[in-house]
């Protein structure tokens, strides 16, 4: 099938923020069902104002080091980053050497994602982590108000061998301000501790010997009590090779040590059929703006459907019947945050699409690469009709020997870390083949970059009406 150019929203349309963009003329009618309203940040249009140029820049976090061997071969791949925003505005990203396996590396940006420096001196356990790391900031409440930790996890799925649950490390380093609040800095980390394998931490071995955990934790959500107040409990989510999605609850004991509950199935027996048929995995959890509901977005690894969402109004105890989302939100490894300036929900992901006349046929899917959806929480409730405001193409990833940007992107991208600061600056970190194949330095290599924007800079740059201030 001949490749077709991506239709880009550069038409200078001015619309109300509640009205969906109208596609520019010339969109290929053979892909009408995927007539998504895409704003392109992968290449800068001519005449773009200099104040918006920053949104089109790929800021390099790290590139492969040929002197480092992975599985006996020269390194040409860095992948799967995740981000956390510190109280002082610094950003930490964690990522593995290799495809979701290998040593975990940490880098920090002190200038809002423009430049990055390695954090060194990590414990030896960082050298043999087995999967994509995920990183979170824990803000304690109640009698521990003012305390804070960073938590980083890495699953141990075995990769064809026996799984070994998941590993977790904590950072307690930082400073306490004059008001008594502690602010972590992520400079010093404890050795990883293993949970739910046959050789886990004392008291946390798995009942059946082990869990083959994958992407632990795709999400980690602070829970509320019966009165709607946040507690010092966090719900961690992972899945296994049978595509069971699990939850485990984190608390801390009197000695400030982690306590994880035995993992249990997230969905009930009646929901298992769709979970198994569509292969639910790597779900993201986002709380509603009112705070009384959780939404969980599933990747569907079977690649024969849209992405799915389920809702909980009892803090993750029970979940609604999963329902499909819109094409605009169909993809893998969703990461979601709210923009505090506009109140808009921002979700970044790896896109999954289908070729013309082959909708939901597994072997006919393709990817538009690393995309970001902008909309409202209410769009999630609308299911397939929740198309949102628009979609951003963050950066192009080149397939094979490609050296030109097209609609078709290399699918090994996404898994993006996402932070949004109090001024609405979104900083996203992802991996991929971001250089044309003919680039003499980085062509054909998979490396890590950040992209940066604010929503109202997007709207101003592309001639759209500004979103209302939250």
Image (tube, rainbow, N blue to C red):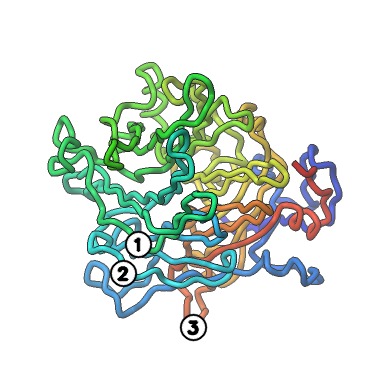
User: What x and y, as percent, mark residue 102?
Assistant: 28, 61
**Figure check: 43 above or below 270:** below
CA neighbours of label 2 inside 10 A, class few (<14), some (14 to 19), many (20+): few
Q: Which residue is mark 1?
A: 188
Lateral position of residue 191 relative to residue 344, left or right? left
Asked whether residue 299 is in view, the answer is no
CA neighbours of label 1 inside 10 A, class few (<14), some (14 to 19), many (20+): some
Asked whether residue 419 is in view, the answer is yes
Q: Which residue is mark 2?
A: 121
Q: Which residue is mark 3?
A: 440
Task: Residue at 35%, 38% (x, y): give it.
Answer: 238
How many angstroms separate mark 2 from mark 3 (CA)? 32 Å
The label number, if any, that marks residue 53 in the structure image: none
Between disc 3 and disc 1, the foreground one is 1
Q: Secondary structure at mark 3?
A: loop
Q: Secondary structure at mark 2?
A: loop
How many angstroms separate mark 3 from mark 1 (CA)? 37 Å
- First in sequence, mark 1 or 2: give its number: 2
Q: Secondary structure at mark 1?
A: loop
């Amino acid at each position: 099938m001949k490749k077709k150019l991506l239709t880009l929203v550069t038409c200078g349309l001015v619309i109300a923020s509640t009205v969906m963009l109208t596609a520019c003329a010339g969109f290929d009618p053979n892909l009408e069902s995927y007539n998504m309203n895409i704003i392109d940040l992968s290449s800068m249009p001519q005449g773009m104002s200099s104040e918006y140029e920053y949104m089109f820049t790929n800021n390099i976090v790290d590139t492969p080091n040929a002197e480092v061997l992975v599985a006996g071969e020269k390194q040409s791949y860095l992948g799967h980053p995740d981000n956390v925003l510190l109280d002082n505005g610094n950003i930490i990203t964690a990522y593995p050497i290799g495809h979701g396996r290998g040593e975990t590396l940490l880098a920090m940006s002190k200038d809002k994602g423009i430049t990055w420096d390695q954090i060194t001196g990590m414990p030896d356990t960082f050298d043999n982590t087995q999967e994509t790391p995920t990183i979170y900031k824990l803000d304690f409440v109640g009698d521990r108000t003012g305390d804070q930790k960073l938590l980083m996890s890495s699953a141990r799925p075995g990769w064809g061998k026996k799984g070994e649950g998941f590993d977790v490390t904590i950072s307690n380093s930082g400073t306490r301000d004059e008001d008594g609040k502690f602010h972590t800095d992520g400079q010093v980390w404890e050795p990883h501790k293993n949970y739910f394998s046959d050789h886990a931490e004392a008291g946390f071995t798995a009942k059946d010997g082990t869990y083959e955990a994958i992407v632990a934790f795709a999400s980690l959500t602070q829970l509320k009590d019966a009165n709607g107040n946040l507690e010092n409990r966090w719900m961690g989510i992972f899945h296994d090779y049978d595509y069971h999605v699990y939850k485990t609850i984190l608390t801390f004991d009197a000695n400030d040590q982690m306590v994880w509950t035995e993992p249990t199935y997230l969905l009930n027996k009646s929901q298992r059929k769709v979970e198994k048929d569509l292969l639910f995995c790597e779900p993201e959890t986002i709380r509603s703006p009112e705070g009384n509901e959780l939404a969980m977005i599933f990747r569907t690894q079977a690649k024969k459907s849209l992405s799915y969402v389920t809702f909980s109004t009892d803090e993750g105890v029970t979940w609604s019947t999963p329902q499909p989302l819109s094409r605009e939100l169909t993809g893998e490894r969703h990461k979601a945050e709210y923009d505090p300036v506009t109140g808009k929900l921002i979700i970044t992901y790896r896109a999954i699409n289908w070729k013309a006349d082959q909708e939901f046929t597994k072997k006919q899917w393709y990817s538009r690469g690393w995309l970001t959806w902008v909309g409202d929480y209410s769009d999630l409730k609308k299911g397939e009709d929740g198309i949102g405001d628009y979609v951003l193409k963050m950066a192009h990833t080149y397939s094979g020997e490609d050296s030109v940007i097209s609609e078709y992107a290399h699918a090994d991208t996404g898994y993006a870390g996402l932070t949004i600061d109090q001024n609405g600056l979104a900083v996203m970190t992802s991996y991929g083949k971001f250089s044309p194949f003919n680039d003499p330095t980085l062509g054909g290599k998979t490396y890590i970059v950040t992209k940066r924007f604010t929503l109202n800079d997007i709207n101003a740059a592309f001639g759209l009406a500004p979103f209302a201030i939250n």
